[in-house]
């Protein structure tokens, strides 16, 4: 809720804060990102890539299209076809926009002979995928037709599955801490009645038992829900709630015996024989669209400093202090900090401070500060600090941002 008691809607805030928008000529459910929104998204993507690199993932890129046969093999064509865009005919072949990244990653795994020494092989990609939503919600990021997914597939032995799934849950826990959000609940999503699931009862039992074991060992509270599984296997869903209490799935961890078999994936074991790996599918922040929508609503635009589109507002009191303000903004840019100068041309100092109320740091520079290479700092939470050297400000803010801390100043 915001001050006026209205539920914060990311679509309204996204427009007010110039984060993203849509155009009927591009189409509903196909938002574009404006510079401030792109800054938030890029910061989030870089966080995820860095966290994944540290956790032993290696990144790949793969095309957003594939031949129809690829998805027939993966099972998407028969189990997920209603959500896919129709095929495009090119030179006698049919191509489709991919509904998920898994089939491409399975082929990348299969492209080389694999030894047990390479396992667990953790393959990550922040990649595009598409869903033929019949009605994209205009102006929103939560129901989109073009999705950028933070995805990864861990190819591993059966014995390694529990540890890999637990490692993924730990990545999720840390990411939520950095983003300043909390899961509404953990859900073990199981198949339900109806024909959309691949039939292999024994595999479903094994993968469900593995995920239950991981959840029980983690000490996390969770609920089981029928009818929420992926078509190829059960999953752990990390649910978040919007300010109105509506839940959606942000992060997932899934165990899959189905696609390794469909793609005939193999590795050479210590015994010299060929064995079938298991695929653990996992997403730490889900799609960047849904993650940013949730962050916008949760923080009502007041993002943690590392995610803020503008991290530092530089406010010269008068035109006299403008050159010092420009110099400070330049030093911020050199250190990779996002600063914006808001000079007297934009109104009184009070008005400019109010206009920057969502910016974590506001550096006020008067003639005295300009002469001494100092700034008077105001924090978004209302704190006002005595004048400090500009170099100290850069070090302190740089450290908070680098640590992806949700605090502003100690
Ligand atoms: Zn997958």
Image (cartoon, rainbow, N blue to C red):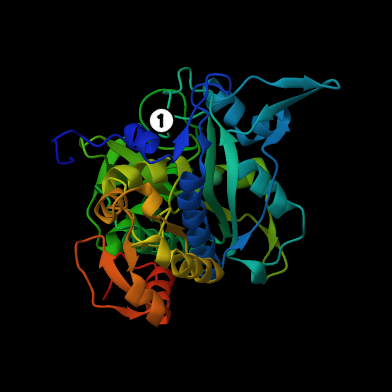
Considering only vertical position in the picture, is 56 above or below 139?
below
Rendered residue at 41%/67% (across/down): 321
Furthest toward the right, the residue is 91
Q: Quadrant of the C terminus?
A: bottom left
The quadrant where residue 191 appears: top left
Residue at figure coordinates x 46%, y 45% from the top left? 37
Q: Secondary structure at mark 1?
A: loop
Could you tell me residue 288's position as x and y percent?
A: 47, 45
- The answer to whether any part of residue 231 appears in the image is yes
Quadrant in which the N terminus is drawn = top left
| Viewer-side residue, 52 vs 243 | 243
**Front one among 198 and 92:** 92
Task: Reply above or below: 218 against 137.
Answer: below
Q: Position of residue 409 (x, y in %)?
A: 28, 73
> How packed is label 1: few (under 14 Cα within 10 Å), some, or many (20 or more)?
many
Identified at 38% across, 37% down, the residue is: 14
Q: Nearer the viewer, residue 304 or 284?
A: 304
Image point 52% across, 63% down: which residue?
Answer: 52
Give above or below for 375 relative to 322: below
Q: Ligand 1, what quadrant?
A: top right
Task: Examine the image and state in which quarter residue 132 appears.
Answer: top right
> x, y (%) of residue 407?
28, 67
**Is residue 188 at least partly visible in the picture?**
no
| Position of residue 103 in the picture relative to residue 29 (left or right) | right
Quarter of the image holding residue 127?
top right
Position of 179 with respect to 133 (left or right) is left
- Furthest toward the front, the residue is 320
Q: Which residue is mark 1?
A: 140
List x then y, in percent, for residue 58: 62, 63
């Amino acid at each position: 809720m915001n001050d006026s008691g209205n539920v914060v809607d990311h679509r309204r805030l996204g427009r007010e804060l110039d984060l993203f928008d849509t155009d009927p000529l591009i189409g509903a459910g196909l938002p574009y990102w404006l510079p401030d929104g792109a800054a938030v998204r890029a910061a989030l993507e870089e966080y995820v890539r860095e966290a994944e690199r540290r956790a032993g993932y290696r990144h790949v890129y793969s095309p957003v299209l594939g031949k129809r046969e690829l998805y027939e093999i993966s099972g998407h064509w028969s189990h997920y076809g209603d959500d896919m865009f129709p095929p495009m005919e090119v030179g006698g072949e049919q191509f489709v926009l991919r509904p998920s990244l898994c089939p491409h990653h399975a082929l990348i795994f299969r492209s080389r002979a694999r030894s047990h020494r390479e396992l667990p092989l953790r393959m990550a990609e922040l990649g595009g995928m598409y869903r033929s939503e019949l009605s994209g919600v205009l102006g929103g990021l939560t129901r989109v037709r073009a999705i950028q997914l933070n995805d990864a597939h861990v190819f591993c032995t059966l014995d390694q599955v529990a540890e890999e799934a637990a490692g993924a849950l730990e990545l999720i826990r840390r990411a939520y801490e950095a983003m300043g959000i909390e899961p509404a609940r953990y859900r073990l999503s199981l198949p339900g009645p109806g024909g959309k699931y691949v039939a292999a009862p024994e595999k479903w039992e094994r993968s469900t038992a593995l995920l239950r074991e991981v959840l029980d060992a983690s000490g996390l509270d969770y609920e089981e829900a029928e009818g929420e599984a992926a078509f190829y296997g059960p999953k752990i869903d990390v649910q978040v709630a919007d300010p109105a209490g509506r839940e959606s799935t942000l992060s997932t961890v899934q165990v899959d015996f189905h696609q390794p078999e469909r793609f005939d994936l193999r590795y050479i074991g210590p015994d010299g024989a060929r064995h079938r790996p298991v695929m653990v599918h996992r997403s730490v922040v889900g799609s960047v669209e849904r993650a940013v929508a949730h962050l916008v609503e949760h923080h009502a635009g007041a993002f943690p400093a590392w995610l803020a589109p503008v991290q530092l507002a530089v406010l010269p009191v008068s035109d006299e202090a403008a050159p010092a303000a420009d110099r400070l903004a330049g030093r911020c840019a050199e250190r990779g900090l996002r600063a914006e100068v808001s000079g007297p041309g934009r109104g009184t100092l009070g008005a400019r401070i109010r206009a920057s109320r969502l910016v974590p740091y506001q550096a006020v520079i008067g003639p005295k500060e300009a002469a001494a290479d100092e700034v008077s700092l105001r924090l978004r939470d209302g704190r006002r600090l005595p004048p400090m050297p500009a170099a100290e400000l850069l070090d302190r803010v740089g450290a908070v941002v680098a640590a992806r801390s949700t605090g502003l100043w100690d």
